[in-house]
Image: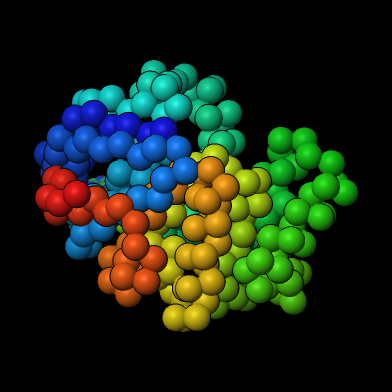
Amino acid sequence: MIQLYHVHKNYGNYQALVDVSLKVEKGEFLYITGPSGAGKTTLLNIVFCGVKADHGQILVGGKNILKLNDSDIPYYRREIGVVFQDFKLLPRKTVYENIAFAQRVIGVSSKEIKRKVWAALKMVGLSHKKDLLPPRLSGGEQQRVSIARALINEPSIILADEPTGNLDYDISMEIMKLFEDASAKGATVIVATHNREILKTFPHKVVKLNRGKVVEE
Ligand SMILES: Nc1ncnc2c1ncn2[C@@H]1O[C@H](COP(=O)(O)OP(=O)(O)O)[C@@H](O)[C@H]1O
Ligand SMILES: [Mg+2]
């Protein structure tokens, strides 16, 4: 379960999040929506421990993540599959290696990694591009690599920032189904999107932000 209590975040004197409280149960699927600049990315980054809130509490599985030491953060993140708005792929590593990388770091055997990476590549329809470097891929393909990387470890939390932003309609639908499957299997999923089509086709709880404030739930 993820709970935010009265979270504030300023960048300088700009208020990116103002008194945001919300709750997502284990296995629940939540959309964060709202116009560009509303604070969606900031909110996901706060849950990921990439951005530190100025005030408030963030409880994830009962743990106050604002209290994590820097050395605890990598362990905390092992439970999280994240799809960043700008993908954050390693440009000099192949598609295969981008997906395998985090698995190697945590000491999964090569054989197991191979099995998982193949399954993940197949899931996002990119098996034929496994040896390419990310700069050789289209935006949508890079996005799918980042989604495969996020899902490979069957994380208990999935944070996805505009995950269908660069994808065609059909592929967007496939990707949303993958997130829904993960949620049905017990993962807590938070997807930031302003795509109305997605919100309509895959209805779930929605928290709407505007200028950093929750305006609708
Ligand atoms: N690192 C930063 N420094 C200064 N301002 C930032 C930074 N990150 C985001 N902002 C500002 O905070 C506001 C919210 O940004 P963001 O969370 O990216 O919104 P969204 O994802 O909804 O578009 C925007 O006005 C943005 O310009
Ligand atoms: Mg954003």
Q: Which residue is located at x 44 percent, y 54 percent?
A: 160
Q: Quadrant of the N terminus?
A: top left
Q: Quadrant of ligand 2?
A: bottom left
- Work out whether 38 lies above or below 109: below
Residue 134, relative to residue 168: is it above or below?
above
Q: Which residue lies furthest to the right in this view?
A: 111
Residue at 87% from the left image edge and 49% from the top image edge: 111
Q: Where is residue 10 in the image (x, y as percent from the top left)?
A: 18, 38
In this orientation, does residue 57 appear? yes
Q: Is residue 144 above or below residue 76?
A: below
Residue 152 horizontal/vertical position (percent)? 65, 52
Spot occupied by residue 93 in the image (x, y as percentages of width and height): 69, 59
Q: On the image, which quarter does residue 121 sit in?
A: bottom right
Q: How many badges with numbers are in the image?
A: 0
Q: Residue at x 28, y 65 (%)?
A: 194
State the image coordinates of residue 213 (x, y, percent, origin top left). Answer: 14, 45
Residue 54 visible? The answer is no
Q: How is the image coloured?
A: rainbow
Question: 208 and 41: which one is in front?
Answer: 208
Choose top left, top right, bottom left or bottom right for residue 123: bottom right
In front of the other: 199 or 86: 199
* Horizontal arrangement in the rendering, residue 193 relative to residue 147 (left or right): left
- Tell me the residue at 81%/55% (across/down): 115
